[in-house]
Structure formats: C-alpha cells, structure tokens
Image: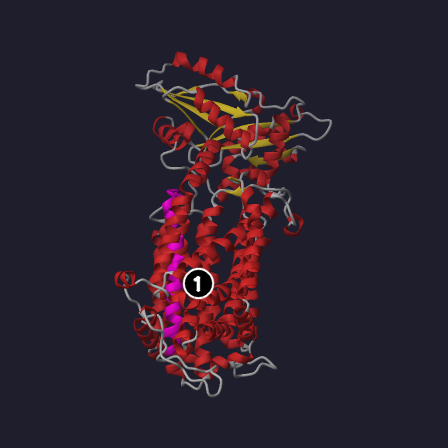
Amino acid sequence: MNRFIRRIGGLSARRPWTTIGAWAVLAAVVVALSGALGGAFADDFSAPGSESAQAMELLEERFPQAAGGTAVAVFAAGDGRQLSDSEAAIDAALAQVSEIEHVAAVTDPFDTGRISDDGRIGYAEIQLDVPSTEFGRDRAAVLADALEPARAGGLTAEFGGDAAFLNAEEESSSAEAVGIVAALVVLLVAFGTILAALVPIVVALVAVAVGYSGIVLLAGAMDVSTAAPAIGAMVGLGVGIDYALFIVSRYRENRAAGQPNHPALVAAMGSSGTAVFFAGGTVVLAMAALVLTGVGFLASIGLSTSLVVLLAVATALTLLPAVLSLLGDRVDAGRLVGRRRAPKPAEATAWWRLAHRISARPWPYAIAGALLLLLLAVPALSLRTGFPDAGDNPTSQTERQAYDLLADGFGPGVNAPLLLVADLQDTGLGAEDIPGLAARIAADPGVAEVGVPRVTDDADTVVLPVLPTTEPADPDTARTLERIRSLTPDGVAVTGPTALTLDLDDQLRDTRPLFIGAILLASVVLLMIVFRSVTVPLKAAVMNLLSIGGAYGVVVAVFQWGWLGGLFGLEGTYLVASPLPVIFFAVLFGLSMDYEVFLVSRIREATIVTGDDAEGVARGLAATGRVITSGALIMVCVFLSFVTDPSPFVQMIGLGLATAIALDATVVRMVLVPATMALLGRANWWLPGWLDRLLPHLDLDDVRTAPAPHLSPGAVPVPALAGPSSR
C-alpha cells in the first residue's frame, strides 16, 4: 500500500497540470450530472416495518387524502378582543391559503369549533395532497405570507403544524465562513507562511464542492436527508484540511531535512499519504455503518458524508501533490514576520519533554486522564432522547409561535396529534365497532379528545384522529401511545407525526448496540492490519469510547440540564435529538481514529528506527504533536462555528463534535496514548503468529525513505523491531 500511494503521489506531482485538469473535468461532469439527474433533499422520519409506517402505507394506498401532509393556520386576537370580531380578515387569509399549490382543503375554525374557550385563539386545519416533507420551503413561505390579510386586520397569524416545522425557513448562518477563517489563522500559525496555509484550505474546498454536487446526484437515486449536505460539509471540511495539513507538514519536514522537492514530496506521500488513506478509510467505515440502523435519513447522511470524505482523501493524494509540485519553493512564500525557517530539533520541543515526562511516570497521567474523561461522561448516564419539534425552534420563527399559541389555547396535546387507522377489509372489524373503540380511547387519562371518524369511499378504512393531553416530547405521550395500542384490536394501527417519530426513536435505541458493535469491530480489524498489533486497536477503541462518552456528557449537561445554556443562546432545555447519539458516534469514532493512525504510525516508525519503545513514543509525539494539535484546533473551530446556528439541533452537533475532538487531541492523544504505550512497552506490538498469517499484509511504514531530521548528533538508528511488527 505504501508503494501504491507513493506511485499515485509521484505521478500526480510529475504531471501536475494533467492532474488539475482531470479534477476540473470531474468537477464539471459531477456538477452537470447533478443539475440534470440530481434530486431534492427530503426527510423520511419513519421506522421501516413499524406499526406507524405500515399504517401510513395503508393510508397512502386507500386514503391518500388522509395520508397527505398537514398544517395549521393559527390566529390570535389581542387582549380584550375576540376572534369573531375579525372573522372577515380570517376568511380573506384562508381564501388565499386555499389557492396555494398542493393545498387540498382548508377548514373554517368557526365552523369546526376550533376556537379557544376565551375566544382569543383559533386555528384552521390545512390538508395537503403531498407529504409534509415534499411541500417545500418556498411554498411554506408563500403560505405564511398568505396570512397577511389577518395580520392587516389586527390579528396575530402564524403558520404551524408538521409541514411548517419540516419546511421551516433556515435563518442565515455564517458558520462555514467563520470555520474557514479560523482554520486559516491556525494554519498560518502552524506553517508560518501564507501559501502553505492556503493550500490545505483550497484542496479541502474542492473536495467539499465536488462532494456537495455528488450528494445532489445521490438524491436523484434515493431519499437524502436535508441534514446530509450540512453534516457532509462540516465533516468534509474538517478532514479535508486535516489530511492536507498532515501531508504538507511531512513534506516541509522532509525538505527541511535536506531532501530535494520531488523526493521530499514522494516520501511524504509514502508516509503521511498512506496514513491519510487508512485514516480516511476509518471515517468512511464509521459513517457507512449508519446504514445498519435501517433508518433511511440516517443511511443517507452516512453515505453522503462517506462520499465527501472519500473525495477529501482523493484530493489529498492527487490534487495536493500536483499543487505542491507546481509551487515548489514558493510554498514557503509569504513568511510571517518573526517565524524561523527550520523546525526545531525534536529534543527542543515541548512535545519531546512532555512525552519523556509522561513516560517516566505513566501511572499518574493515565489515571488522571481517564478520571477526567469519566467525570465528563457522568451526565451521559442521564441521556434522554426525543425528536425535535417546533417547540424547540427559536421563538422568532412562525412555526414556534404557532406551537406556543396552540398550546396556550388548546393544551399541549394539540401539537402531538395521533391517527388511528382501522382496516375494515378482511380483518373482522366493521363500521359498527368504531364508536366503541372511540369511547375506549377517549376514556384513557392521557387522551384529551377523539375526533370525528373519516371513512373512505369504499368504506374499507376508517381514520380516527386523537389528541393526547401532553406535548410530543413529553414521556407521558409515549406512555399514552402504548396504552392506546393496547386498547386497539387487530386491524387497527396508530400513526401520525408523533407516532412515527416515537417509533423511530424506539428503533434507533434498539439498533444502537448493533451499530456500535459493527463500527468497533471494523475499526479494530482495520487497525490490526495497519499496525500488525492486537493491543493498539483495542486500546484505541477504549480511548475513543472515553472521549465520545465525555462529549455525550457535555451535550447532556448543556442542552438537557441547561448548564451554561445562556452562553450558547439557548432559550430553554432540550432533549438530545434521537439521531444524534448514532451520528455522533459514527463521526467521532472515525475522526478519533484519524489521530490514532497519524500518531501511532509515527511512533511505530520512530520505534523501528531507534529500537527503543520509550524513545519511539517521544519521537512520535514530538513529530506529530504540533500537527495533531493544529489539525484538532482547526476541526474544533469548524465545529464550534456551527454553535452560532439558531437551530438547537445544529448547535448540539457542533458542540458535541468540537468537545470530542478537543478531548481526543489533548487528553487522549497527548496524555493517555503515551502513558499507556509507556506502560505496555513492547506489548504494544504484540500479534499472535496465527493472526499475523491470517491478516493481509499492508506496508504502512516508509522507514527506508524517511529522513532522520530530528536525531541528535551522534544518534544512530538501530535495526527494525523483531517480529511481525517490523513488516
């Protein structure tokens, strides 16, 4: 593998314009295909095979009017006024709403009795002829504007319901721009020259741009979540800059050691380029494992992010050496004032001193690091998940204001509607059974109202609307759903937006162990192949779990408990969004393995050269400490920039990822890894002979071409390690 990556990098460097042209053609083709064959993004929040999903499929087949999306227009009069005083203004607004494309029917709140007891708040039910996810943001904005006659009449008029929440207008956020600027600052400090700092960002942006078009193209073949482009861009930008950073750093290190430009670049591709290949592979494996959840929108996020990461690896291994080859010595142009040209010898770095200090007394550092991570992870024991709803959105948005008005006027359960679907065809049920069923449901203490049954023209299906007494995210709503299902006979199923999300929450909880186990197994096997060791991958898995647990704990403390919520502009406390634990795990495990590959590959390389385990750890940490810290700081900046987003869901992602990367690059890579490797000594590279024969052999090390720029005068490399690890 080492020789293969060297050949790819060398070929790209020898023919830079051909390589750049090939990327330009690829980008043009992908953009053109995405425009011609690409699809729109949509979310399907259903658990395949669940009761709610099957009931929705039955409705789509027999009763498409009831299977369409729903929304509400909410009207409120000021203090001392009644809605009836402005009935003409409401009628004018609803007349405009009824003319909007895909609006199938609009009810009159005065005819249906949807007026609060005090006469101040009312709502009109809006039935769509398409699912809520397909209504679209443009039409949702038009519908919200159509309520203007009511506002002109002195009323508060808001657009709410499922279609409003799923198609809410996104408030502008400069997260990506802030992240890129922060990354540029970090790279300037790390490299000391303007061009060297710009190269990783340009290469990463190419990967993200082509990746976005690829995601649009993917949406033409399958349903792709609306969150997939944002998460793909977030992760792709972070890893793309990191991968280029690691290769550029090794290239400049080789040049500082006296190697000519081309050999220095080829050697960097053989060492750091190979590490990038395997590091990217771990991220792709982790993200692709989201398919195992069986949930469509999560699978689309995993595949989309994997696509962007693959492109980030590809640009790092081909486009980057082409650009570096063209730049040559100019890569050091624009040097910052006061920055020295030659890097410090390893022995003069703080990382060298830190590694030797930890190696001398590993137990205190190992215990302190583990305790810190365990302490941060304690809040994760209280983790509660649920699906976001309009009540979690900023109070400035129309769907949130509609949500609050409905809760004030009709109780919180009005925002958590359920639908009972009775199949009267070949189930033994008849229309005469429906009144008794409705009475049993209405008697449940968690039910506020049972609506009027709706029957298909063929009289083979009945839909019975039910409103619980509690809001969607309240645990009592889930218990009410369970009781309702226990009261229904065969042939009757419960669906609706609330039931769909609760069933999906259950499925994610049930599949989480399989998903986590698959990622752990795949990553451990891959690292066994890479490092010819059993100890290194098992140790990496345990440490990654610790840093991820710490990130979970911080997210729970901030969002669920409300600690430091004001610092992040939060308006209250929130359940952790159900998809986030699995998304976090996939992203964080993959990114953590990135740093493990980069650090341990240098430690192993240095150990082979010196023959001394403690010295190998010190040299590996000295060689990668600044680079890993810079790369992690870039990712933290990119991820933290998303904390400025108005959506709590996006904020959770940004804070969780930033926290885990910060913990991984500091506590784990800089403390726990050297401490445990010092404790284990030669056992770090233990691999049973039978397993060595079973695993495929891949050449990760590039010791033959690696310079020894940081050896002290008089230091002499020693023969490679004995045993399988020397391969």
Horizontally, residue 606 falls left or right of residue 149, namely left
Which range is magenta? Answer: 267-296
Give the amino acid at mark 1: Asp
| Vertical relation: 320 (above or below) 371 | below
Query: Which residue occupies the extreme top position in the image?
Result: 432
Q: Tell how many labels.
A: 1
Position of 303 with respect to 554 (left or right) is left
**Does 542 sit above or below residue 82?**
below
**Residue 497 seen in render:** yes
Residue 272 colored in magenta in the image: yes
Residue 336 at x, y percent in the picture: 58, 79
Q: Is residue 365 magenta?
A: no
Question: Which quadrant of the view contains residue 296?
Answer: top left
**Residue positioned 44% across, 37% down in the render:** 504
Front position in the image: 260 or 122: 260
Asked whether the viewer can see residue 303, the reply is no
Q: Residue at x 59, y 49 (%)?
A: 646
Q: Quadrant of residue 609?
A: bottom left
Residue 76 horizontal/vertical position (percent): 65, 30
Q: Residue 443, position in %: x, y?
A: 52, 16
Residue placed most toward the observer, 491 or 43: 491
Quarter of the image that includes the C terminus = bottom left
The residue that label 1 is drawn on is 594
For this orientation, the residue located farthest to the right is: 80
